[in-house]
Image (cartoon, rainbow, N blue to C red):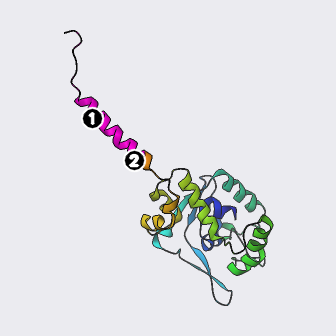
Amino acid sequence: MLLGAAAGLRPGEFFGLQLRHVDLPHATVSVEQQIQQTAKHCVYVCPPKTVRSHRTVPLPRMAVDAIAAHLGDLPTDGLEGWIFTAPQGGPVVYTHSMDGSWRPACTKAGIPKGTGPHALRHHYASLLIKHGESVKTVSERLGHTNAAMTLNIYTHLWPDSEERTRAAVDKAYADRSAEAQPQVDEAA
Protein backbone atom coordinates (compact mmCIF):
# COMPACT_ATOMS: atom_id res chain seq x y z
CA MET A 1 0.00 0.00 0.00
CA LEU A 2 2.82 2.36 0.81
CA LEU A 3 4.38 1.93 -2.62
CA GLY A 4 1.08 2.72 -4.33
CA ALA A 5 0.83 5.96 -2.35
CA ALA A 6 4.51 6.85 -2.76
CA ALA A 7 4.90 6.11 -6.48
CA GLY A 8 1.42 6.33 -8.00
CA LEU A 9 1.54 2.89 -9.55
CA ARG A 10 -1.58 1.15 -10.78
CA PRO A 11 -2.36 -2.00 -8.74
CA GLY A 12 -1.38 -4.28 -11.64
CA GLU A 13 1.91 -2.38 -11.97
CA PHE A 14 2.98 -2.83 -8.37
CA PHE A 15 1.89 -6.48 -8.38
CA GLY A 16 4.01 -6.87 -11.54
CA LEU A 17 7.21 -5.65 -9.90
CA GLN A 18 10.12 -8.01 -9.74
CA LEU A 19 13.42 -7.37 -7.99
CA ARG A 20 14.98 -6.36 -11.32
CA HIS A 21 12.58 -3.38 -11.51
CA VAL A 22 13.67 -1.81 -8.23
CA ASP A 23 16.87 0.23 -7.96
CA LEU A 24 17.18 1.14 -4.30
CA PRO A 25 20.60 2.86 -4.57
CA HIS A 26 19.16 5.26 -7.18
CA ALA A 27 15.72 5.36 -5.49
CA THR A 28 13.72 4.40 -8.58
CA VAL A 29 11.25 1.78 -9.71
CA SER A 30 10.79 0.87 -13.38
CA VAL A 31 7.37 -0.05 -14.71
CA GLU A 32 7.95 -2.62 -17.45
CA GLN A 33 5.06 -5.03 -16.96
CA GLN A 34 1.88 -5.58 -15.02
CA ILE A 35 -0.11 -8.47 -13.60
CA GLN A 36 -3.65 -8.95 -14.84
CA GLN A 37 -6.26 -11.40 -13.60
CA THR A 38 -8.40 -13.73 -15.64
CA ALA A 39 -12.07 -14.38 -14.95
CA LYS A 40 -11.07 -17.66 -13.23
CA HIS A 41 -8.72 -15.90 -10.77
CA CYS A 42 -5.54 -16.85 -12.57
CA VAL A 43 -2.92 -14.22 -13.31
CA TYR A 44 -0.71 -13.43 -16.25
CA VAL A 45 2.12 -11.00 -16.95
CA CYS A 46 1.52 -8.48 -19.73
CA PRO A 47 2.84 -5.10 -20.87
CA PRO A 48 1.76 -1.95 -19.02
CA LYS A 49 -1.55 -0.33 -19.98
CA THR A 50 -0.11 2.04 -22.62
CA VAL A 51 3.21 2.79 -24.28
CA ARG A 52 3.61 5.82 -21.97
CA SER A 53 2.96 3.56 -18.96
CA HIS A 54 6.51 2.23 -19.39
CA ARG A 55 8.37 4.58 -17.07
CA THR A 56 10.86 5.02 -14.28
CA VAL A 57 9.43 6.62 -11.16
CA PRO A 58 11.55 8.29 -8.47
CA LEU A 59 10.97 6.90 -4.99
CA PRO A 60 10.89 8.99 -1.83
CA ARG A 61 13.20 7.92 1.00
CA MET A 62 10.33 6.44 3.05
CA ALA A 63 9.41 4.13 0.15
CA VAL A 64 13.02 3.04 -0.35
CA ASP A 65 13.28 2.24 3.36
CA ALA A 66 9.96 0.34 3.36
CA ILE A 67 10.91 -1.70 0.27
CA ALA A 68 14.33 -2.50 1.73
CA ALA A 69 12.69 -3.73 4.95
CA HIS A 70 10.11 -5.72 2.96
CA LEU A 71 12.81 -7.33 0.81
CA GLY A 72 14.75 -8.27 3.93
CA ASP A 73 11.79 -10.41 4.98
CA LEU A 74 11.46 -12.22 1.62
CA PRO A 75 13.24 -15.33 0.45
CA THR A 76 15.51 -14.43 -2.44
CA ASP A 77 14.49 -15.65 -5.88
CA GLY A 78 17.07 -13.57 -7.71
CA LEU A 79 16.22 -10.68 -10.01
CA GLU A 80 13.10 -12.48 -11.30
CA GLY A 81 11.64 -12.76 -7.79
CA TRP A 82 8.33 -10.98 -7.21
CA ILE A 83 8.36 -8.04 -4.81
CA PHE A 84 4.81 -8.87 -3.70
CA THR A 85 3.76 -12.50 -3.62
CA ALA A 86 0.62 -14.49 -3.10
CA PRO A 87 0.54 -16.56 0.11
CA GLN A 88 1.29 -19.70 -1.91
CA GLY A 89 4.06 -17.91 -3.84
CA GLY A 90 4.05 -16.37 -7.29
CA PRO A 91 2.33 -13.17 -8.34
CA VAL A 92 -0.61 -11.70 -6.46
CA VAL A 93 -4.18 -12.35 -7.54
CA TYR A 94 -5.94 -8.96 -7.31
CA THR A 95 -9.24 -10.20 -5.86
CA HIS A 96 -7.42 -12.30 -3.26
CA SER A 97 -5.40 -9.24 -2.26
CA MET A 98 -8.57 -7.16 -1.97
CA ASP A 99 -10.25 -9.73 0.29
CA GLY A 100 -7.18 -10.77 2.28
CA SER A 101 -5.32 -7.49 2.74
CA TRP A 102 -6.85 -4.34 1.29
CA ARG A 103 -10.38 -4.40 2.72
CA PRO A 104 -9.32 -5.51 6.22
CA ALA A 105 -6.64 -2.78 6.28
CA CYS A 106 -9.18 -0.15 5.15
CA THR A 107 -11.64 -1.26 7.82
CA LYS A 108 -8.95 -1.08 10.49
CA ALA A 109 -7.85 2.39 9.31
CA GLY A 110 -11.41 3.71 9.10
CA ILE A 111 -11.24 4.22 5.34
CA PRO A 112 -14.71 4.28 3.75
CA LYS A 113 -16.02 0.98 2.42
CA GLY A 114 -15.68 0.78 -1.37
CA THR A 115 -12.37 2.66 -1.52
CA GLY A 116 -10.07 0.72 -3.81
CA PRO A 117 -6.29 0.67 -4.19
CA HIS A 118 -6.55 3.05 -7.14
CA ALA A 119 -7.21 5.73 -4.50
CA LEU A 120 -3.50 5.53 -3.63
CA ARG A 121 -2.69 6.62 -7.18
CA HIS A 122 -5.02 9.60 -6.82
CA HIS A 123 -3.41 10.42 -3.49
CA TYR A 124 0.02 10.43 -5.14
CA ALA A 125 -1.16 12.70 -7.97
CA SER A 126 -2.79 15.04 -5.47
CA LEU A 127 0.44 15.33 -3.49
CA LEU A 128 2.46 16.15 -6.61
CA ILE A 129 -0.02 18.82 -7.63
CA LYS A 130 -0.22 20.30 -4.12
CA HIS A 131 3.55 20.68 -4.06
CA GLY A 132 3.73 22.49 -7.38
CA GLU A 133 4.57 19.80 -9.94
CA SER A 134 3.62 20.65 -13.50
CA VAL A 135 0.92 18.82 -15.41
CA LYS A 136 3.68 17.38 -17.63
CA THR A 137 5.53 15.89 -14.65
CA VAL A 138 2.37 14.49 -13.06
CA SER A 139 1.39 12.95 -16.40
CA GLU A 140 4.82 11.33 -16.81
CA ARG A 141 4.90 9.95 -13.26
CA LEU A 142 1.43 8.43 -13.65
CA GLY A 143 2.19 7.03 -17.11
CA HIS A 144 -0.79 8.77 -18.68
CA THR A 145 -1.11 8.77 -22.46
CA ASN A 146 -0.77 12.56 -22.51
CA ALA A 147 -1.02 15.65 -20.30
CA ALA A 148 -4.59 16.29 -21.47
CA MET A 149 -5.66 13.04 -19.81
CA THR A 150 -4.06 14.20 -16.56
CA LEU A 151 -5.82 17.54 -16.79
CA ASN A 152 -9.16 15.85 -17.48
CA ILE A 153 -8.83 13.92 -14.22
CA TYR A 154 -7.03 16.37 -11.93
CA THR A 155 -7.61 19.90 -13.23
CA HIS A 156 -9.72 20.77 -10.16
CA LEU A 157 -6.67 20.21 -7.94
CA TRP A 158 -4.36 22.76 -9.54
CA PRO A 159 -4.55 26.00 -7.58
CA ASP A 160 -6.56 28.87 -8.97
CA SER A 161 -4.15 31.41 -10.35
CA GLU A 162 -6.28 34.54 -10.72
CA GLU A 163 -4.04 36.59 -8.44
CA ARG A 164 -0.84 35.30 -10.06
CA THR A 165 -2.29 36.14 -13.48
CA ARG A 166 -3.12 39.70 -12.42
CA ALA A 167 0.27 40.18 -10.80
CA ALA A 168 2.12 38.90 -13.88
CA VAL A 169 0.34 41.28 -16.22
CA ASP A 170 0.61 44.21 -13.80
CA LYS A 171 4.33 43.57 -13.38
CA ALA A 172 4.91 43.35 -17.12
CA TYR A 173 3.16 46.68 -17.73
CA ALA A 174 4.63 48.36 -14.65
CA ASP A 175 8.12 47.44 -15.90
CA ARG A 176 7.33 48.84 -19.36
CA SER A 177 5.85 52.07 -18.01
CA ALA A 178 8.96 52.60 -15.84
CA GLU A 179 11.09 52.16 -18.98
CA ALA A 180 8.91 54.64 -20.87
CA GLN A 181 9.22 57.39 -18.23
CA PRO A 182 11.57 60.16 -19.37
CA GLN A 183 14.74 60.35 -17.37
CA VAL A 184 15.09 63.66 -15.55
CA ASP A 185 18.57 65.12 -15.50
CA GLU A 186 18.82 66.39 -11.95
CA ALA A 187 22.01 68.30 -12.70
CA ALA A 188 20.27 70.59 -15.15
Specify the principal SS of the magenta part.
helix
The magenta span reads 164-188
Residue 163 image point, x, y percent: 44, 46
Camera-nearest residue between 144 and 80: 144
Provide the residue designation for mark 1: 176
Q: Amino acid at mark 1?
A: Arg
Say if 157 sits above or below 88 in the image: above
Say if 168 sits above or below 63 in the image: above
38 sits to left or right of 146: right
Question: Is label 2 in a helix, a strand or a loop?
Answer: helix
Residue 172 image point, x, y percent: 32, 39
Residue 111 image point, x, y percent: 73, 67
Say if 68 sits above or below 183 in the image: below
Say if 150 sits above or below 43 in the image: above
Residue at the limit of the structure toward the right, as seen here: 108
151 sits to left or right of 78: left
* Residue at screen point 55% across, 59% down: 57
Instruction: Check residue 165 in the rendering and tell me which mark sits there, or answer none.
Output: 2
Instruction: Check residue 111 in the rendering and tell me which mark sits there, or answer none.
Output: none
In primary-sequence order, the first of circles 2 and 1 is: 2
